[in-house]
Amino acid sequence: MSAHAAEVASGERFRFGENWRRFLEQLDEGRILAAENSLRDMLESGRLDHLSFLDIGSGSGLFSLAARRLGAQVLSFDYDPQSVACTSELRRRYFPEDPGWQVEEGSALDEAYTGRLGRFDIVYSWGVLHHTGAMWQAIGNATRLVAPGGRLFIAIYNDQGKTSLRWMTVKRLYNRSPAPVRWLLLAASFLRLNGGALFRGTLRGRPLEAFRSCRLRGMSVWSDLVDWVGGYPFEVASPAAIFDFCRARGFTLERMTTTHTLGCNQFVFRQPAR
């Protein structure tokens, strides 16, 4: 049994890849364009031609696909074998046998593996490194993969103190429970997270307004809910902690979007040219 399979069997890891497999059934051109636009927006780049792009924890493969369509040379890797299969499936659908997009299985915590990858113009990891079980080590490994003058684009769950600790308990329970309990946790979590916004949006005649941020990234409301409730291991960090950590490694902050909720803070850092 692989290390990943053992962690899933013991309830210590969520099956992210199974969730992404279901998401691919909903993938369409509109979602792909939304993913491309979100990359262009945060990176402030119209195109990524002639740039190398590393997708750490590629998941469904959507953002690897978006980067490739924007012209980047892409390397995707994920720890979850089924996520690797999802990314490989998108490569097969849209860029079959393309030497400009490679897909591998690997861990952000495996320094022997990441040390063989080289350096990249853009190192991207959205909502992944806090699920490794050793977030700061994973972020540190990611910083070492950025080429001189390159950028690090990461998104990390916001630290909400006791609220984050309560959600950690929910996530741990979800992964250690039978299916009926998981469904109950999903239903309760959906109401807890979206009930108020749905009610207010309905009063204004815009009931789907609560899911705007999800649509802007081309994601799925249901897939994001399952990913949130089941997403374990789980760590969080304040914007200041991420800023200080990366600044200590020589990076300068180019762009940041923060949230006051349980979602992700996004950061784009620049590695000085040497």
Image: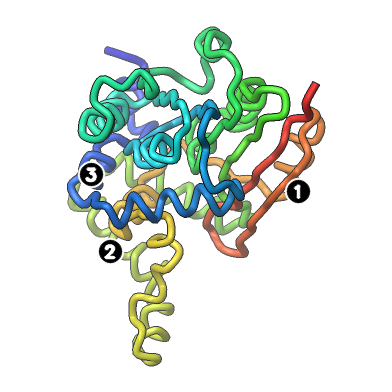
Taking depth in this image into account, of 162 and 157 the one nearest to the observer is 157
Q: Is residue 224 left or right of residue 233?
A: left
106 relative to 36, above or below = above
Residue 120 in view: yes
Residue 185 can be seen, yes or no? no
Q: Residue at x 81, y 31 (%)?
A: 248
Circles 2 and 3, Cβ within 8 Å, touching? The answer is no
Q: Which mark is on residue 161?
A: none
Amino acid marked by disc 2: Ala
The residue labelled by disc 3 is 24
SS at circle 1? helix
- What colouring method underlies this structural image? rainbow
Q: Residues within 10 Å of mark 2 (few under 14, many from 20)?
A: few
Whether residue 106 is situated above or below residue 13 in the rendered picture: above
Residue topped by disc 1: 240
Q: Which of 63 and 175 lies nearest the eye of the viewer?
A: 63
Q: Estimate the spatial distance between the alpha carbons at disc 3 and disc 1, rounded to whole Å.
A: 35 Å
